[in-house]
Amino acid sequence: MAGTFYGIGVGPGDPELLTMKAVNTIRKVDVLIAPKTEKKDGSVAYNIAKPYLRDDVEIVYQVFPMVKHFEESTEAWEANMKEILGFLEAGKNVGFLTLGDAMFFSTYIYVFRLLEKKGVNIETIPGIPAFIAIGSHLGWPIVEGNDVLSIIPATADKETIEKVMSVSDNVVLMKVYKNFPEIADLLVENKMIDNAVMVSRVGMPDEERIDDILARKDQPVNYLSTVLARRTPEK
Amino acid sequence: MAGTFYGIGVGPGDPELLTMKAVNTIRKVDVLIAPKTEKKDGSVAYNIAKPYLRDDVEIVYQVFPMVKHFEESTEAWEANMKEILGFLEAGKNVGFLTLGDAMFFSTYIYVFRLLEKKGVNIETIPGIPAFIAIGSHLGWPIVEGNDVLSIIPATADKETIEKVMSVSDNVVLMKVYKNFPEIADLLVENKMIDNAVMVSRVGMPDEERIDDILARKDQPVNYLSTVLARRTPEK
């Protein structure tokens, strides 16, 4: 009988932010896939899940190169899928660790789609997204009452970002490492800069909180950085 | 020495979706506040946290009447704050259970602000929001790549909802119980109805999934219902 594939969101950094279900699943699977972006890197998701590993679980590192369009993806991906299918066909239950939430801006989504097409039995376990962890960690209410919140990857095209920021009083900006100076300017233009905060690597040992975003405008920004901001109400 | 106040997000329904930190906190506090909206109701957050309670923890139900503007709030709220402060001053650690995430559309935000003003030592523990749980539960990728996601309470004014929906390809609609027929119409107008799903009470025993939103348009909708939708791309 073929095994089950579990996508496991491990949250943004603090191992205590895994759900009970994520921990229970990590403890029951035979194989855990620890994804990384480049061969030389470690697996961020693996480091977060580490306190919960069974001694005899099989850890398999897989490299998922970043691709702009999923269609470009490649030999590396196919080899990874083949390896996962091999475990499942051998009757092993396989967990796939994924940073933050599993269905929210994750590589796991592509893995999920590929395996779903193959008729694999899949269960996905949610995780705490970074912006949610930041709100509690800083004592920063994210949204309340009738507030609208838009979650914007800073890698989207500029026109889209501008349009969405202009109609949303509350925003979360993700992946700000690429065009951070432009994002800082947009926060100013949208009267959000006075109620904005950036947190890098929330819940990790090297977490950083940046309150004065403008002062940091020309310095490099960590890959795992998120901005929370709200428009200053008109007087 | 005064106690610490813990805001504890318990997630949307399934007790397995509490984080380790939430469970550890529930197990260590002396008093747990179980909020409810009306005196006759039970506490939804309490029911979710129930499997983790210590035998000797003191459970205190508090009624937080729904108010349109927080400023209206009232004797009931003040009495609740006074009771919490009493516990803290007696050196007790107090947990406050809250549905979903603590800083995301919650009554807890107001409690947090009031106690913060009083100089109380507060720690907030995040929880899985309903829309995040729905994505994993249904195998429904929420957002990927450069997608923008807007989270809209259906109780916001119509003009705001229309503007935000028109510029966001992916939306989460919360609190849809009040004006569900209008929301269904907006999903049609925005070409999102073919990729939309509604889930009520995700993870609870009486959970319901509604795929054909239009067919349900004129029936009452549960208070805890969330719609996930995305725009059908132009051909």
Image (spheres, coloured by chain):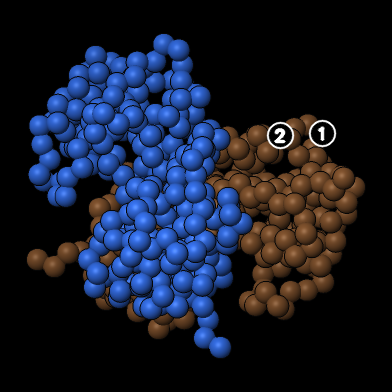
Chain colours: A brown, B blue
Q: Is residue A132 left or right of residue A38?
A: left
Residue A43 position within the rendered picture, expressed as x and y whole percent measured from the top left:
68, 52
Q: Residue at x 19, y 38 (%)?
A: B65
Can the viewer see residue B110 in this picture?
yes
Looking at numbered disc 2 in the image, what kind of residue is underneath it? Arg
Which image quarter: residue A82?
Answer: bottom right
Q: Which residue is mark 1?
A: A56
Q: Residue at x 9, y 66 (%)?
A: A235
SS of the residue at dot 2? helix
Is A211 drawn above or below residue A68 in the view shown? above
Residues at discs 2 and 1 in contact (Cβ within 8 Å): no
Residue A53 position within the rendered picture, expressed as x and y whole percent measured from the top left:
71, 35
Chain ID at mark 2: A
Q: Is residue B162 left or right of residue B29?
A: left
Q: Is residue B73 left or right of residue B103?
A: left
Mark 1 closeness class: few <14, some 14–19, many ≥20 residues within 10 Å:
few
SS of the residue at dot 1? loop
Which image quarter: residue A93?
Answer: top right
Q: Residue furthest top?
A: B56
Q: Which of labels 2 and 1 is toward the front?
A: 2
Is A66 drawn above or below residue B33 in the view shown? below
Residue B71 position within the rendered picture, expressed as x and y whole percent measured from the top left:
11, 46
Work out whether mark 2 precedes mark 1 in sequence or the reverse, and give the earlier one: 2
Q: Residue at x 74, y 35 (%)?
A: A28
Residue B161 position within the rendered picture, expressed as x and y whole percent measured from the top left:
30, 69
Q: Residue at x 24, y 73 (%)?
A: B159
Which image quarter: residue A104?
Answer: bottom right
Disc 2 and disc 1: Cα gap in Å? 10 Å
Q: Which residue is mark 2?
A: A27
Mark 2 closeness class: few <14, some 14–19, many ≥20 residues within 10 Å:
some
In front here: B67 or A180? B67
